[in-house]
Image: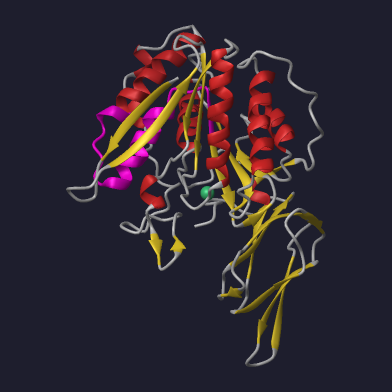
């Protein structure tokens, strides 16, 4: 195991900010996996999974059973972890810039593509190596303007050459779910099964330049531009695993999730050993464009009639929003058949607030597909 410390730009002199990465497996491995947790700093179930993965990977490494290089970043957001306001953790947005920690990663496609056609050849493997080298060089050439960009660039540099990127998040109150691309789905479908994903939502470009997509979109766009003339594979496939809700920091759940990741790695031959039989997928993959945010039409006291993990039908009552001044009750109903996979932790809804998330089958949205 190799422990690396990455100095981040500090917002003010006299303070130090660091990112720690842990690297397992033979350095000359052909394939590599990058796993980070808690990019939204108050989404902590993944941090416990990362802690357990560190122990498991150290054992596998000692036993000579690792066929891949694996990088673990258990605390992907030291900035957000320090943001507490009057006993409330605020880890989704940086308080300095008000930006979401999982949006606006640098789009490197143009920098990589410049003059690329003179470098590419007939070998897909060589082409992947060439593009990966350019990707890292382009990221290293950038200078961050502030602490948030310094964090984002450091994470991108660490992950940009990995074959597989796993970003461990969670929702507010939720069951197991995930986001990935249609192209990556065959790679991650076994992981979805071991994990027990109850909503698997697929999109190539959800519009936010999120961490997972800042890698896959580069390969998609290069394939679009040059794929007819040169063989270009997917140098990176990535997935955002949502480890239930913010309260689900639990040893049994984290044991389950870390085992799911190890079993998926066995299934890909990244870890030696016999992967267990694949369990059934609880709910089929659906387009992210068919996911719908159910919102409160007015403000009021929020009372739920459905729990995450319930399959619902169009028109079914999901929640009531109660105005106790005018004695009015507003219904929030399912907009199509599907799976309620997440809901708000708040119980006083504000007008327009997202109350629950529904994985539907009928794509009705386009453009920006994510929550703010
Ligand atoms: Zn998150």
Is residue 144 in the magenta section?
yes
Q: Position of residue 288 (x, y in %)?
A: 63, 46
Q: Which residues are magenta?
A: 139-166
Residue drawn at (48%, 23%) of the image: 162
- Can the viewer see residue 45? yes
Residue drawn at (32%, 19%) of the image: 115
Q: Relative to 179, say whether 26 is above or below.
A: above
- Can the viewer see residue 201? no
Q: Nearer the viewer, residue 205 or 37?
A: 37
Q: Position of residue 272 (x, y in %)?
A: 65, 13
Left or right: residue 6 versus residue 161 is left
Q: Position of residue 157 (x, y in %)?
A: 37, 29
Left or right: residue 278 versus residue 131 is right
Q: Relative to 225, say whether 66 is above or below.
A: above
Left or right: residue 17 versus residue 299 is left
Left or right: residue 211 versus residue 355 is left
Q: Position of residue 358 (x, y in %)?
A: 70, 56
């Amino acid at each position: 195991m190799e422990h690396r410390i990455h100095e981040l730009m500090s917002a003010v002199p006299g303070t130090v900010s660091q990112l720690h990465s842990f690297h397992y497996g033979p350095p000359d491995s052909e394939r590599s996996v990058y796993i980070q947790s808690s990019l939204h700093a108050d989404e902590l179930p993944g941090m416990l999974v990362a802690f357990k993965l560190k122990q498991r990977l150290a054992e596998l490494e000692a036993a000579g059973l690792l066929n891949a290089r694996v990088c673990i970043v258990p605390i992907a957001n030291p900035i957000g972890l320090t943001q507490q306001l009057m006993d409330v953790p605020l880890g989704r947005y940086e308080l300095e810039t008000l930006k979401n920690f999982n949006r606006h990663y640098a789009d490197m496609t143009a920098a990589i593509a410049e003059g690329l056609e003179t470098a590419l050849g007939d070998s897909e493997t060589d082409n992947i190596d060439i593009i990966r080298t350019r990707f890292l060089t382009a990221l290293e050439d950038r200078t961050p303007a502030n602490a948030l960009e310094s964090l984002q660039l450091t994470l991108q540099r660490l992950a940009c050459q990995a074959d597989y990127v796993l970003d461990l998040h969670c929702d507010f109150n939720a069951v197991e779910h995930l986001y990935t691309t249609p192209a990556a789905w065959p790679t991650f479908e076994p992981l979805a099964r071991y994990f027990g994903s109850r909503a698997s939502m697929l999109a190539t470009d959800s519009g936010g330049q999120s961490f997972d997509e800042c890698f896959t979109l580069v390969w998609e766009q290069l394939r679009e531009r040059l794929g007819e003339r040169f063989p270009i594979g997917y140098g990176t496939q990535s997935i955002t695993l949502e480890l239930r809700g913010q309260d689900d920091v639990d040893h049994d759940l984290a044991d389950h999730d870390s085992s799911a990741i190890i079993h998926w790695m066995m299934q890909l031959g990244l870890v030696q050993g016999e992967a267990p039989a694949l369990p059934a997928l609880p709910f089929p993959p659906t387009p992210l464009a068919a996911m719908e945010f159910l919102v409160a039409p007015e403000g009021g006291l929020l009372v739920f009639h459905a729990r995450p993990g319930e399959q619902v039908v169009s028109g079914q009552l999901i929640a009531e929003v109660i105005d106790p001044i005018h004695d009015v009750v507003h219904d929030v109903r399912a907009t199509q058949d599907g799976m309620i996979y997440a809901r708000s932790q708040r119980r006083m809804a504000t007008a327009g607030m997202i109350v629950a998330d529904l994985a539907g089958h009928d794509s009705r949205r386009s453009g920006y597909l994510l929550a703010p």
